[in-house]
């Protein structure tokens, strides 16, 4: 049997975990995260294109970066469909 102190500690632990989960959800859907992903993707692809000597590497890096950004913007829509029609729990 749990004591009242143990129950309080358990509740605090659950609340702390719930707050972490909420923070993670908020970060996952934030525009700042998406912008940072776009910038990092653009820089990584631009550097790679530059190293392998592709013409206009920084201009050509825009297309895959935008494609990646669009994929992150559409994921919530597909997640809802998946939850509704496939992951029926």
Image (cartoon, grey):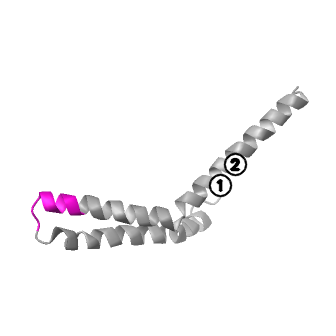
Quarter of the picture containing the N terminus is top right
Residue 20 location (% of width, % of height)? 64, 48
Q: Residues within 10 Å of mark 2 (few under 14, many from 20)?
A: few
Task: State the residue at coordinates (54%, 64%).
Answer: 29
Callout 2 secondary element: helix
The residue lying toward the viewer, choosing from 47 and 75, is 47
- Residue 59 sits above or below residue 40 on the image: below
- Residue 41 sits above or below residue 60 on the image: above
Q: Which residue is mark 1?
A: 22
Q: Residues within 10 Å of mark 1 (few under 14, many from 20)?
A: few
Quarter of the picture containing the C terminus is bottom right
Task: State the residue at coordinates (51%, 69%).
Answer: 78
Callout 1 secondary element: helix
Say which quarter of the image contains residue 5: top right
**Left or right, residue 45 beside residue 12:** left
What secondary structure is the stretch in magenta mostly built from?
helix
Do tag 2 and tag 1 residues touch (Cβ < 8 Å)? yes
The magenta segment: 46-54
Residue 18 location (% of width, % of height)? 70, 48
Q: Which residue is mark 2?
A: 18
Say which quarter of the image contains residue 65: bottom left
Q: What is the tally of numbered marks visible in this picture?
A: 2
The residue lying toward the viewer, choosing from 61 and 72, is 61
Question: Can residue 52 be found in the magenta stretch?
Answer: yes
Residue 43 location (% of width, % of height)? 28, 61
- Residue 62 sits above or below residue 37 on the image: below
**Left or right, residue 34 beside residue 52:** right
Say which quarter of the image contains residue 71: bottom left
- Marker disc for residue 52: none
Task: State the residue at coordinates (13%, 57%).
Answer: 51
Question: Can residue 60 be found in the magenta stretch?
Answer: no
**Left or right, residue 51 beside residue 44:** left
């Amino acid at each position: 049997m749990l004591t009242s102190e143990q129950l309080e500690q358990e509740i605090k632990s659950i609340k702390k975990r719930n707050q972490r989960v909420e923070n993670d959800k908020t970060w996952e859907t934030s525009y700042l995260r998406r912008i940072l992903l776009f910038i990092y993707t653009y820089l990584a692809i631009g550097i790679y294109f530059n190293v392998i000597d592709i013409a206009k590497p920084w201009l050509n890096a825009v297309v895959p970066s935008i494609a990646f950004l669009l994929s992150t913007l559409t994921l919530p829509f597909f997640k809802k469909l998946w939850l509704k029609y496939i992951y029926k729990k």
